[in-house]
Every structure is written in C-alpha cells, then in structure tokens.
Image (tube, grey):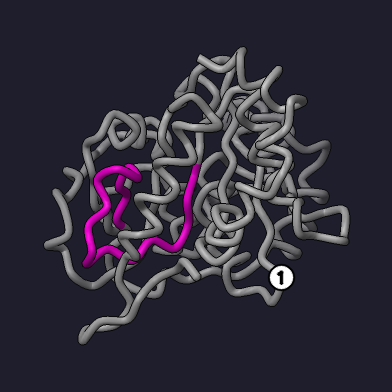
Amino acid sequence: MLGRGRGKDGRHMDMMLKDAFSRLWRKYFNGAELPITFYYTDDQGHTEKAKPTSGLRCLIGALAEVRKGNSLCFDVDSIGCPGGRRYAGFADRLMPNFEYFLSCGIPGKLQGERYKKSPELVKEVMRLAPAFKAPSRFIVFKRWDLLEKPDDPAVVTFFAEPDVLAGLFTLANFDESEPNGVIAPFGSGCSSIIQHPYLEGKAIRPRGVIGMFDVSARPHVPPNALSFSVPMAKFVHMVENAEESFLTTESWRQVQDRIN
C-alpha cells in the first residue's frame, strides 16, 4: 500500500509513491508536465521564502516559477493579492465593497469584474463559502520531482491540457460509484488549487477539483491548460489503481499518442 509514512517528527513523503507515480506518468502520460504540490508547515527551512511584494501580484503567476522547478514558501506577508491571502487561509476579511467588485462595480469609484449578476448574489455566495484558516504559518509549493522525505504534501495539482485532464478525471472516478468524484466549484484560481482541494482532503470521500476557470487568473497559465487538484489521500488511490484502469487499453493509447 502506497502512501505517506510516519517518522519521528510526524508524517513524511513516501519515496516509493514518488517513484511509482513518476514511472506511471512517463509510461501513460508521455512525461507531460509534472504536477506541483503544497503543504502547510511552521518550519520555513523547507525551501526558499518568496519575497514580500507591494503590488497585487497574482499567486497563480508566482506559481509559474514552481512549475519550472523553483520551490517557494509563502506566508501572509509574501502573498501580495488579498484573494491569494484569503484562499491560502492567511486572512478572512474581504476588501471593502467586495460584493460590488465581483459584480457590477460602483460608477466612478470601483470597476466591477462582473463575475456575478448582482451584489446581493455575491453576498449569498460568500455566505455559503466554506470557512478556511491555514493550519500553519507557511505554505510550501514544490514540483513533484523535487519532493524529499521530510516533505508532507497535502494536495497535488496538475496544469493539464484537455487530453491529460481527461485521463486524470477518468482515473479519479475509476473507483467511485457516485458520479461527482471530481468537482468544478466557482471561485478564484487560487481557491481552486488551494482552498477547495485542501478542504476535500478533510472529507470522508475526498474528490478531485478542476479549476483555473477564473478569467482574471487565465493570463498566468497556458491557453490550453486547466488545473486538476487532488488531495493526497485520493491521489494515492489513483496511483494504486492506474495499472488496472483504462490506462492499459487501446482506447487510452489513441489519446496518449496525442500527448506531447
């Protein structure tokens, strides 16, 4: 059984799982772009801390460096975007007039994003939104191949083209009887790769999360990519199920041939 082990200081990365996924990824997904991971910790020593920024730098934009192999650690001071701080669990307050910002705006005062029809609807959306507080001081992002034994990834996130996404989606549903083994909740780019999948990891039946539909975050990812994030417990089952799944069939091979 693959998974995370438990050392003297708590949970740590299962290096057998790391190697097993890497082998399967090369075999069935032609070594497409590796996923990134994140976890929370009070120990800053796991990797380089991101520099504080005075501008509204999008967290998704910062993660482009992680996708290239540059691990980063963030705290409340090194995330410039208020939304990024909120959806990473480091802040809970909304900006003033947020209900107008996400909807119609205020003429002459605030430009609205028009992602929701009315301020009243935004208020209802936020009332229904899950509460989320970071469990530790830092959030660490690392690409899969750079994980080391002291790391304890909570969520695995792929930035995937449609064919890769189809494979991940189908594999996530392989051992599910309920049709919604993967969800696509409305939210910001950072909520779809941090908040929602992290909270799914606390559920009895954790689900995968498709995201990066946020129009404001889209410029920070390739035009043919969406995100697929999955809690670690669910991800372990996906790895274990791979060799008995559709990935071994001719149907998948026809799709796999198109993956660069």
User: For residue 141: magenta?
Assistant: yes
Q: Does 186 appear above or below 67? A: below
- Residue at the (73%, 39%) spot, across then down: 246
In this orientation, which residue lies closer to the viewer: 230 or 6? Answer: 6
Give the left or right position of residue 205, taking residue 33 as reference: right
Q: Residue furthest bottom?
A: 8
Q: Does 19 appear above or below 252? A: below
- Residue at the (35%, 76%) spot, across then down: 5
In this orientation, which residue lies closer to the viewer: 140 or 82? Answer: 140
Can the viewer see residue 196? Answer: no
Question: Which residues lie in the magenta part?
Answer: 140-157
Q: Does 243 appear above or below 136? A: above
Query: Residue 133, percent across and down?
Result: 47, 71
The image quadrant of residue 255 is: top right
Q: Does 108 appear above or below 239? A: above
Q: Secondary structure at mark 1?
A: loop
The image quadrant of residue 50 is: top left
Count of numbered circles in the view = 1
User: For residue 168: magenta?
Assistant: no
In this orientation, which residue lies closer to the viewer: 253 or 231? Answer: 253
- Residue at the (24%, 52%) spot, across then down: 73
- Residue at the (57%, 68%) spot, across then down: 201
Query: Residue 23, percent across and down?
Result: 41, 41
Give the left or right position of residue 178, taking residue 90 as reference: right
Q: Which residue is mark 1?
A: 205
The amino acid pointed to by label 1 is Arg
Give the left or right position of residue 186, taking residue 30 as reference: right
The local crowd at label 1, few if under 14, some if 14 to 19, many if 20 or more residues have their Cα within 10 Å, is few
Give the left or right position of residue 27, taking residue 85 as reference: right
